[in-house]
Image: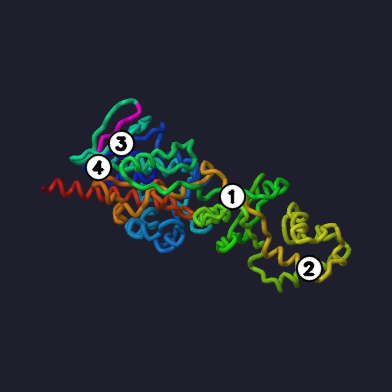
Amino acid sequence: MKVVIVGAGPSGLMAAGLIKSGAVTVLEKNEKPGKKLYITGKGRCNVTNHCTPSRLLESVVSNPKFLYSAVHRFSPRDAVGFFENAGVPLKTERGGRVFPQSDKASDITAALTRHAVAHGAQIRYHAEVKEIKAVSEGGFNVELTGGEKLFCDALVLASGGKSYPATGSTGDGYRFAESLGHRVIPPRPALVPILLDECVQALEGLSLKNITAGVTGANSKIQPVFGEMLFTANGVSGPAVLSLSSHVSRAGFGRGAKICIDLKPALSEDVLDLRLLREFEAAKNKQLKTVLHTLMPKSLAVGFAVKAGVNAEMPVNEVTKQQRGALIRTLKNLTFLIKGLDGIEKGVVTQGGVDVTQLRPTDMESKLISNLYFVGELLDVDALTGGYNIQIALSSGYAAGLSIENKNRQLSQI
């Protein structure tokens, strides 16, 4: 079969390398492959997570059951073996995050590109697809923006979502999917900063470590996520907040919800009370804001006291039991009003996409049109931070590529 793959990201390149028989053409509108990979993990590329398939699926926010087969067929362990066999030594960091030892995302992209080219794939750059039509007799006509037309027997759409549009993820795949009769779940930002309905400019740049953050709405709440967070000029970001944002997006929380931060998740209120009493006893004549510095960054102390309803300037020997209780409750539940999520262009990945109920989970093939496949971020599937999303791209690309290769083998035996 003649095969066209639209998009030279991790899912498209993985699929291309699996199709060892047949003519494979990868169409990439950018000047190089894997452009989004170059900026993932701050340029280091958190390529997977050193975990079991079950643990990975627990970190999937949207449609985890759909991925069961693909993730077990090409697991995180398989991904590690793939890259190390391709000459890219890896290392595992906190939280099971896997990076190339070189800390260069380009090594990951180069390995995937070599994998595709070594098995016969032709990669064409500056090749932007304008339109795709299914042929009634079977196959697809693919028209490029320059007017060139290609025919293929099998088509893999791996063109990404809508996040980071500067990397080429401009949502073209949604248009192609709809033109081919597929439902598209409206794309939303995921793994994105949360905007606050309060002024936090004075806290910009403040990083909090080893906290938990959850969200409470009118009638429901999202369980806290442990990790780090960062205050921005108009909200909060950082690993814990990014993971939290995916749940916020999926649940549809809007303005009026609250983000709730436990600054001391390892300590109970009783233990904190004893600690405060010791700190107060050791610094009887000092101002409250000075003593609070032992519990939190200096830049947070005054704002924290305001949230607790206690004067930060007062000496600690004047702090009442009720005021101490308010301080402790705020340590365990520092809240800010949420305005909403930042724009989809700021999201690490896209939530929403091609409706997976119209696809076969074993190989990502359409249930509506034979030999049409959807892989990677184009799917209505997304996960938390930690390398899970790139693993999903690799696993879905593997499933599609293997399916086409098996069909080619069967055809060759006829």
- Residue 101 seen from this side: no
Mark 4 vs mark 1: in front: 1
Q: Which residue is mark 1?
A: 340
Q: Is residue 147 left or right of residue 342?
A: left
Q: Which residue is mark 2?
A: 324
Q: Is residue 143 above or below residue 387?
A: above
* Amino acid tagged 1: Gly
First reached walking from the N terminus: tag 3 or tag 2? 3
Q: Which residues are magenta?
A: 140-145
> What is the x, y in percent for residue 37?
45, 43
First reached walking from the N terminus: tag 3 or tag 1? 3
First reached walking from the N terminus: tag 4 or tag 2? 4
First reached walking from the N terminus: tag 2 or tag 1? 2
First reached walking from the N terminus: tag 3 or tag 4? 3
Q: Which residue is mark 3?
A: 132
Q: Which residue is mark 4?
A: 154
SS category of the residue bearing label 2? helix
How many numbered marks are there?
4
Q: What is the spatial separation of the Cα atoms under label 3 and label 2, in whole angstroms?
A: 66 Å
* Amino acid tagged 2: Arg
Q: Residue at x 39, y 33 (%)?
A: 29
Q: Is residue 377 left or right of residue 311?
A: left
Which residue in the rendered view is the most extreme toward the front? Answer: 218
